[in-house]
Amino acid sequence: MEPISLQHSAVVLIDQLTERIDDSHGLGFMSPAVYDTAWVSMVQKPGDGHDTWLFPECFEYILSNQLDDGGWTTYASQIDGILNTAASLLSLKRHFIAPLQITTISQECLEERIDRATKALHALLNIWDVNDTVHVGFEVLVPALLGYLEAESIALSFPGRDRLFEVRDQKLTRFKPEFLYMPVQTTALHSLEAFIGLIEFDRVRHHKINGSFMASPSSTSAVLMNASEWDDECEEYLHHVVRSASGNGSGGVPSAFPSTIFEITWTLSTLIKNGFDLDPNLLPSIQKARRYLYDALIADKGTVGFTPYVCADADDTAKAIIVLQLLQQHVSLEPMLKAFEADQHFKTYPLERDPSFSANCNVLLALLHTENVSQYVPQIEKATRFLHKHFRESDLKVSDKWNLSPFYSWMLMTEAISRLLLLFKGSQLPSLKELFEEDLALLLQDITISVLRQQNQTGSWGSRNSREETAYALLILTYAVDYEFTDIPRHQIQMAIHNSCSFLRLNTTVGSERLWVEKVTYESEMLSQAYTLAALKRATDLPLETYDKPEEVLTDTTDTANGNYIESNGHHIEANGHPVESNGHHSETNEDNSVSNGHHSESNGIGSNGARDVSTTGCELPGVTTIGIETGYAETKTVPIETPTSTVDIRNHHQNENHHTESTETVSVGTKRASNSSYRREWTSDQEQILLGPFDYLESLPGKNIRSQFIQAFDAWLQVPAGHLEIVEKAISMLHSASLLVDDIEDSSLLRRGRPVAHSIFGTAQTFNSGNYVYFLALREIQKLESARAVEIYVDALIHLHRGQGMDVFWRDSLICPTEEDYLDMVSNKTGALFCLAIELLQIGSPIEVDLVPLVQLFGIIFQICDDYLNLKSTSYLEKKGLCEDLTEGKFSFPIIHSIRSNSANRQLINVLKQKPRDEDIKRYAVAYMETTNTFEYTRNFVASLKAEAFEMIEDLEKQGLGENIAIRKLLARMSIDG
């Protein structure tokens, strides 16, 4: 296929992909899944005196896809067959019990099918190794199905049953079904069919989006079947999926629809990164896709899921950002980092059990494609460390939860390595170059050797001569060919590229490519074509001195019944000779298993189906383990051997459209330098200034200085020595400013003291680090007091502060309105902690024996409630923080809590809070509503009563011999709601 033909094919593919992008139902090309189809087939609609099966075409699909042994197809892993068969058996049983209008099959025939299906499911369960299953959600889906079958008098025992329910129980200790009632989305909403009998379905209906529950046909069916009232919108959604999704009216439905963002981002990023000229100024389809993705990111506040408004994840967010970056549309990475960055890696979604290799790769690639990569050095280092460690500890046997092919993970890692080495070559990320360059180059060599060894005689890769897997592997080699490895003759890579191109050019028809993981494994024709086109394009664009382009392949096709083969360059390729459901590429079990009935064939690695032995100038390729599967071929394993010191000649082909230039740099990859971690240099003032940049910026902004005045006022009573007083003042000031840096990040604030917040200037990561750094600098100041009690007080205060902030954030993010008592307890921890810390530290150095903490706690509460009031009512706040910023932050402040709880039946205010509005008219409307609940009058009266109580306490202390304290009285008077 010539470059012009490849370009045309890519444009046609994008046109097809974006054709329905503006459809309110969205778009999707995921292949039909028996599992979800079975659930849709079980939906009954109540009518006038009688029910009907709503989707008989789905039941017909189930019947027509039952195998001779009674089960349903195993696409690529054991769990596929188990879920497909269990759900279909449940559908057969329910149709047998209530035939309703179905007359196309007799009861006798249906009974016989149920018997065969039961035996088939039992057989599948008997050979299932629960511990080696990695599909997301299996631990709740399978136990649920077994329970539903038992309710229909079909009880099944099997060796792994106890272990399965043990894993299920472990899962549910971390996730309670009641969480589904909360306003926050979780991935469990995609599988509500697993919670029948455990939840009240009427209480999850607020999660419905465009007629579906997290774009899941099975989940939506479960709601229709179990809610107390019929939902016409859900019915319409399911009808649309049956008519318009990948089943094309056959009755089959996919596990997810729509999947608009997923399919657009994966397809576009794959094509653009690999050399296709897709200019949004010239191609309306690209312009439309760019606008769609940008709007989706903005609407979801910087993160997205696989389709708009579903639970955001790191994978789809990173891919969307990459596409927009490649199309010259600036977007911020901060929301992605804030949502998904963990201590040692990046999470795919908030409650993830095991980290995803591919999600971390995609986040890393998004960081590496940003305009200013140096801004994200900590995150790049974190992701790179995690990925490199993951690769090495698994001995390259990487298993990812979203794609079954190891070549997919290798491809992403190779792309990331290539990008990093290119940045290192351009003198970017110098600190990371020293840490990683040698290890990454060596890893790239090892991956390349392994890929060469896995190539089949046909030129393909994988156990099924898969086009998509072959495209993954070809892309790996096109990245690797940019480097001159001393252990890999260049012509070996060139020949492998040549042969794989020949294989991909033979036939453009896309066969079964079920490599992607949902509830069951699926394929996407769009993605398969995109990877194939990208691999061919990248190979075609290689410079002539790097790659001897293959001649145009001539094919001689001979058609035989069910056994088509194509002869090309002396190779015989069975086009249809492999069963559609032949498996063996899924890294799901540590032992090689192959069952010929189409249900199970899996391995912990890559199929060696006719794998070619590749040698390097007469020698075995070193340092590689090749994993085979039982396909009639011998299992091939190469024992790692010691390798000599090697060098990589980096041939850097800077690609700008189709023009290339070349430069070289030699890097040692065979030996590792001694770690220089022990040679820590003296910390410099320039480095200190870098770390303190956000802190110093905030300190430069004039504030209310109330804490310093507060300390001075109370010191009139405590008479603390000057040195002690100075240390306390400094530590409290540092801690206060540091906590504001973190608070502004957690609250997504825009202004602080009338100026842009620090993280909008220095970035979230740098600002967060600066705040935490100053916490410890403040502790160092406290240590100067030479008092163990002072350190204990400081640590206790930070614990209280974080407890208070944690509850505040939890209520906001969960949209849970606390009680007034809960709020006051939170404020005592959060705001009161800093006030109390200052006084307790002063009391340590005071010659006066007095406990001022109760009065100080009251000061903290008064201060916070006044601040809450002024945030909504003060004009001075408009200049310093913006109009009603607490509403924009979604914060449950004292007045907001009162207003919501004054009339709990009226949900207007809590719904406004849920939206976190920036529109000033909406915020003014909310304030006006609060006037109707007498909230501001109530707040004024409440503050007045607290201040009266505080004045009484001051008078009592003065009468105890401390003397009159005008400064404290003035301070209390300044805490006013009059702004």
Image (tube, grey):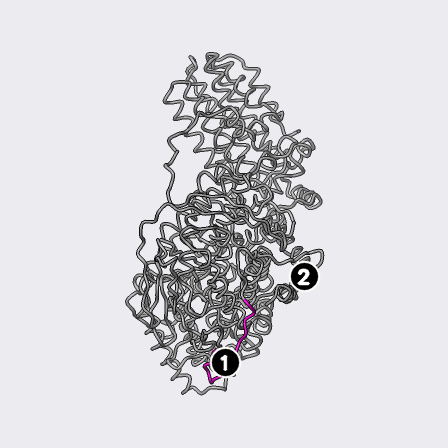
Query: Which residue is tagged 2?
Result: 285
Which SS class for mark 2?
helix
- Relative horizontal placement of residue 351, taking residue 875 as reference (left or right): left
Residue 185 against residue 221 in the figure, above or below: above
Name the foreground residue: 2 vs 429.
2
- The magenta-colored residue range is 551-565
Q: Position of residue 76 (x, y in %)?
A: 42, 68
Amino acid found under the numbered disc labelled 1: Glu
Q: Residue at x 59, y 28 (%)?
A: 697
Q: Looking at the image, is mark 1 or mark 2 nearer the viewer?
A: 2
Residue bearing the label numbered 1: 60
Q: How many marks?
A: 2
Main SS, magenta residues: loop
Q: Position of residue 258 (x, y in %)?
A: 57, 64
Q: Residue 204: x and y, percent?
A: 52, 59
Mark number, residue 552: none
Q: Is residue 394 magenta?
A: no
Mark 2 burial class by Cα count in 10 Å: few <14, some 14-19, many 20+: many
- Quadrant position of residue 589: bottom left
The residue positioned 51% from the left and 20% from the top of the image is 729
Who comes first in sequence, dot 1 or dot 2? 1
